[in-house]
Amino acid sequence: MEYRRLFIIRKDLKLSPGKMSAMVAHCAEAYWLRLFRNADSSSTEDGKVSLNIELDADIMEHYVLGKIVKTICQARNKNQLMKAVTIAEELGLKENIDFGLINDVCRTELTPENEDGTVTVGIWFKPPPTDISHQISKKYHLYMA
């Protein structure tokens, strides 16, 4: 079985190449950072930190130790991006566990759209089996510059 990371980024924001790269990096990190932040940790005498995380065995076997495949799709606008949330929830995925929104704090090139002064740029997914990734991504095109 193959697993695939899926990221969906809004096209209407007309992100510069640097900003686009940063947003995809945020998407890629979000799942792993959530695991690390929720992990039990202990410090060692040599200044290192040991983490005890729970990771699905299938993700470890077929993604971390297997092929690391990523797909970046585009959403025309925020409404289309949010449809991915609905699709994910219909598939039984849980927000902030299996997927999550990436909001930019608008310090550089974006203008706030949300009440908290951020703009919703994209969505990340934990590595799902390829068939689940395709069920979500079939409504979207690959991101094209």
Image (cartoon, grey):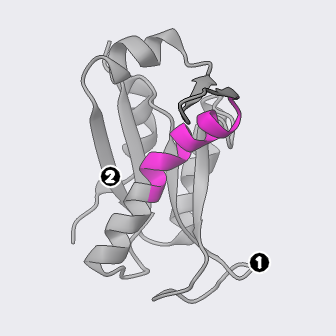
Disc 1 vs disc 2: Cβ atoms closer than 8 Å?
no
Q: Residue at x 35, y 31 (%)?
A: 4
Residue at x-position 43% and y-position 48%: 28
Q: Which residue is mark 2?
A: 72
Q: Residue 126: x percent and y percent?
A: 50, 35
N-term-proximal mark, 1 vs 2: 2
Tell me if residue 35 comes above or below residue 25 in the rendering: above
Point 36% across, 43% down: residue: 138
Task: State whether residue 83 is above or below residue 113.
Answer: above
The amino acid at mark 1 is: Asp
Label 1 neighbour load within 10 Å: few <14, some 14-19, many 20+: few
Quarter of the figure that contains the N terminus = top left
User: Does residue 96 appear to the left or right of 139 in the view shown?
Assistant: right
Find disc 1 in the rendering and name its residue.
116
Residue 139 falls inside the magenta stretch? no
- Along the line of sight, which residue is nearer the eye, 87 or 71? 71
1 vs 2, front mark: 1
- The part of the chain drawn in magenta is 26-40
Q: Left of 30 or right of it: where is 136?
A: left
Q: Secondary structure at mark 2?
A: strand
Q: Is residue 13 above or below residue 53?
A: below
| Viewer-nearest residue: 84 or 54 | 54
Specify the principal SS of the magenta part. Answer: helix
Q: Position of residue 37 (x, y in %)?
A: 67, 40
Q: Residue furthest right?
A: 115
- Residue 135 numbered tag: none
Question: Could you tell me which secondary element the residue under label 1 belongs to?
Answer: loop
Q: Position of residue 101 (x, y in %)?
A: 60, 56
Q: Amino acid at mark 2?
A: Ile
Q: Nearer the viewer, residue 47 or 22?
A: 47
